[in-house]
Amino acid sequence: MEYLLLKNGHLVTSASGILKNADILSGNGRIMEIGHNIKVPNYQTRTLDLNEQYVLPGMIHYLCPFIRQEERNSLSIIDKALAQGATAVLDHIKKSTTPISLSRIKQLQNEFSLLLPSFGFHLSLRELTHQSKEQLISRFAHSGCTSMIVRWKHIELVYNDEYRQILQNISDLNFLLIIRTEGIKQSSLITRRPFFKAYLNRLKKTASYLQQYRVNVLFTEISSHEEIAAIQSVDVNNPEHISMALLPGSDLIPSPLTLTNIIELGRQNQFILQPPTLTSSGPLNAIFPHNSENSSFIKQYIDPISLEENLKVLIEMYATRPAKLLGMHPKKGGIIIGADTDLIIWNPAGNTQNANSLLRHDIKYLVIRGAVVEQSQLIMPEVQADYLYRFPVMAP
């Protein structure tokens, strides 16, 4: 068994708060023990003294666009996700000329099997017409796909008669429907009050309609207080079916959310964090100097006065709650015994001495299923990717 012992770190956990100067023992990529003064199991154990740096769960980047028609862009996207602390990435299988099939999913699994993080897929709602509950289970759930995505420009699909049974099946199987709202807010018309008001009305109508079917729904790219109010105004008996992914709003949007607003709202279970936006622009070798000059998404949400309180909220928003929504908890999303050893070793002061860095300068180490990625590394260790078979159906 391959052991990794992390010593003398401040562990930020959901259940126990912050454990000061604590140790984590990992064996074969799983957390085996958490405590103080853990003994080295054998002479081959790799031991790292964290010098009181913070130990956080790895990020679940559930909107990572790594599936590309031209595969040359995929590597840079993954590198950018890793630089921000991602230890699991998911992308949605887009509509193509042929319907999504088990063979297509298997092909993509094989295609990305050399990527370092754990990875998984969402399905496009547009692909699921005329699928019975049994077909959803046999064709998709058994292949690990238990979340569906619809973009706002296709939101009319959810009201289409032929999708009613699909929505009921999604609800019965406890799948997740992700509604991406970024498209409409990229319109130049969004600054006009009548246009924005019409969008809010449709947002409220959509949330209300989906709750008739008790669908678990995640609205992403929510960046204003008015959007939150529109969704929360829906009168439902089970508000836990509705979740929202938050990000700071621009001045073009009425009542935009601030970083402080997001941390305050993050104390409520229905809110998660919108993961960092990733693009494939620029050459791969430009990523490394950019990392050494910039901090991760974590730093922007942290008030130095309330650092530890902010961290406890933040790990819930970017790791624990997304993992639960996506059916990956407790394997992913927390620092608990039995979970994958997916960790961010975070230093609030950062390190800008490296001219080139694989990780953002405030991330000292990234641990992915027990494999340690160091800030100064420019080549990833060879660890085979782990395809995520997700709840409620286990791997075949």
Image: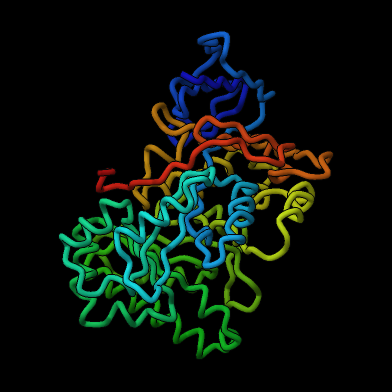
Query: In the picture, residue 270 is in which quadrant?
Result: bottom left
Residue 345 quadrant: top right
Q: Does residue 310 lie above or below 256 as drawn?
A: above
User: Is 130 rendered above or below residue 65?
Assistant: below
Query: Residue at the spot x=75%, y=53% of the render?
Result: 285
Please state the total of marks drawn on the protein image: 0
Left or right relative to 109: residue 235: left
Q: Position of residue 72 (x, y in %)?
A: 61, 60
Whether residue 68 appears in this view of the structure is yes
Q: Residue at x 51, y 49 (%)?
A: 318
Q: Position of residue 46 (x, y in %)?
A: 60, 19
Residue 239 visible, this orientation: no
Q: Is residue 27 left or right of residue 358?
A: left
Q: Quadrant of the C terminus?
A: top left
Instruction: Identify the residue at horizontal 32%, vertical 71% (top origin).
Output: 99
- The quadrant in which residue 150 appears is bottom left
Q: Nearer the viewer, residue 91 or 250?
A: 91
Q: Nearer the viewer, residue 199 or 179?
A: 179
Q: Position of residue 158 (x, y in %)?
A: 30, 77
Report x, y in % for residue 41: 50, 10
